[in-house]
Image: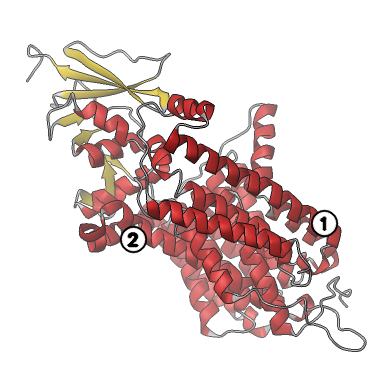
Amino acid sequence: MNSPNPALVTERAATRLPRVALLLLCAAYLLPGLFGRDPWKSADITAFGYMMSLAKGHGSWLMPTIGGLPADGALLPYWVGAGFIELLGPWIGAPLAARIPFALLLGIVMMLTWYSTFHLARTEAAQPLPFAFGGEAKPVDYARALADGALLALIASLGLLQLGHETTPELGQLAGVALFLYAMAAAPFRSWEPRVAALCSLPVMAASGAPTIAITLGVAGIVLCRRSSYESVRRLVVWLVVALVLAALAATVFGAWGLRLKGYDRLGSIGSLLRQFLWFLWPTWPLALWTLWRWRKHLLNRHISVPLSSALVALVACLSMGGSDRALMLALPPLAVLAAFILPTLQRSTAAALDWFSVFFFTISALFVWVMYLAMQTGWPAKQAANIAKLAPGFTPSFSWIALVLALLGTAAWLWLVQWRTGRNRHPLWKSLVLPASGVALCWLLAMTLWLPALDYARSYQPLVSRVSQHVPPGACIIAPGMNRGLIAAVEYFGGFDVDAVNNEQSSDCEVLFVSETRTDRPAVSAGWTLVAREVRPTDRDTIVAVYRRTRLAAR
């Protein structure tokens, strides 16, 4: 017989977060960064380059290329992005069209995390203890309050902030993990929905470049389902087996198989990995660990075992890949679910510490954003303005009333929320995660409104491509052996050039040669080429592109 669970929840504590407030918070997290920017280096512009290659008909849909270099096996996200570019690109521009489906994917991940927590919290083992004289939370209200907490924990996760707003295949993998988590969670309460989710989750992951993780998740899911006391959960095994077969087929057809293992050669690498875990998984990792301790006698119950197994698969994948942050991102939805189950047992002193830390950290961060924005627009404070000019030479600030109004509204909402939380609102289960989630959303909103022109200038390859384009005839063919794929994609998109990154300067007929250099490394170029210019990326002095022209004597 299971031990009594540690949760004691009153009916008042199971109050749900107002839906309008929750939707506005999700919008403040999802929409900033969607508009008004270029694809950023490096993974963002690389993935966008493959989507543009498909949209323009360069190469087959089974082998998109950048400069002749084939993509990895993550074809499904490229297909989706290319489809949106063809559909919406002529009206709203290719970058925005490509970002829309990935913003939708992030929204789906958030929704699936909410519903996964909701269904897991409805299981018998997860329900709070009844009171002797009544007044305990109703099962559905309790589940809804915990689901609100899980969604807040996901939004508060620092590691999701940048990676979750890119147009990369990892968003497809993240959606696959969230689908799998939902299928496992909803199986006792729904009929066809979890089966469809299970059937789609693993093939989506495999087609997005993570077949090994998909297979491992599927095997873990089969083991959990076989030992479940729910008949409907045991019947899910057949669907997971079919999903495994489909995932293997998708990985084979797309050429996605391959282990990206990486070791650790020194203690510094391990220390760097630990620091990455500390900030990337904040604040879900301490809450999830606390959940495992407080519910330690219930580790085999599905509200703990389902998210725990999914998180462990992602963590092991991250470790085996040398600390890959993109593999680590896959652990965030299940960790957010685990974090939600500590909320019924969270002590008031711990909740207060989390609140005050959030108030000070995010208020100071927001104030810093505003000060730097003031320096960009007015030149005061002078020291900050000088720092901006030094970090982004050549950047010209621009002003937008829309950006300013949105930033002011977000800041006002934050101040109201701090006043609300520091008042006497102590009852809702999700109260301790409101400030961390809202603080992350606020800083992202401010950065993507007040700082967006500067960040776009710093993170985009367009300034560098504009410089090198001055030395290249329009429509020229460019040889770029050894150049990174992000820069190749930028030269093709921003410059409109044909890039050959497969051949070298001796085997290609192109008249222009690009060579990637650093301040300490300048690769030698064979005879027959004349140096025209060396251009530096304004915000990264180590990114240098040397432009060569074929001499007349060497011309073919």
* Residue 28 screen position, x and y as percent: 50, 60
Residue under the point 41% across and 38% down: 454
Nearer to us in this view, 353 or 1: 353
Residue 309 visible, this angle: no
Against 183, residue 41 (above or below) is above
Precedes in sequence: disc 2 or disc 1: 2
Against 24, residue 286 (above or below) is above
> Residue 556 lies in what quarter of the image?
top left
Give the quadrant of the N terminus: bottom right
Badge 1 marks a residue whose secondary structure is: helix
Residue under the point 61% across and 65% down: 151
Q: Name the residue under label 2.
A: 80
Count how many numbered circles sit on residues in the image.
Answer: 2
Q: What residue type is disc 1 on?
A: Thr
Nearer to us in this view, 355 or 406: 406
> Residue 40 lies in what quarter of the image?
top left
Q: Name the residue under label 1.
A: 350
* Residue 379 screen position, x and y as percent: 45, 31
Badge 2 marks a residue whose secondary structure is: helix
Against 400, residue 241 (above or below) is below
Residue 363 visible, this angle: yes
* Residue 490 screen position, x and y as percent: 29, 38
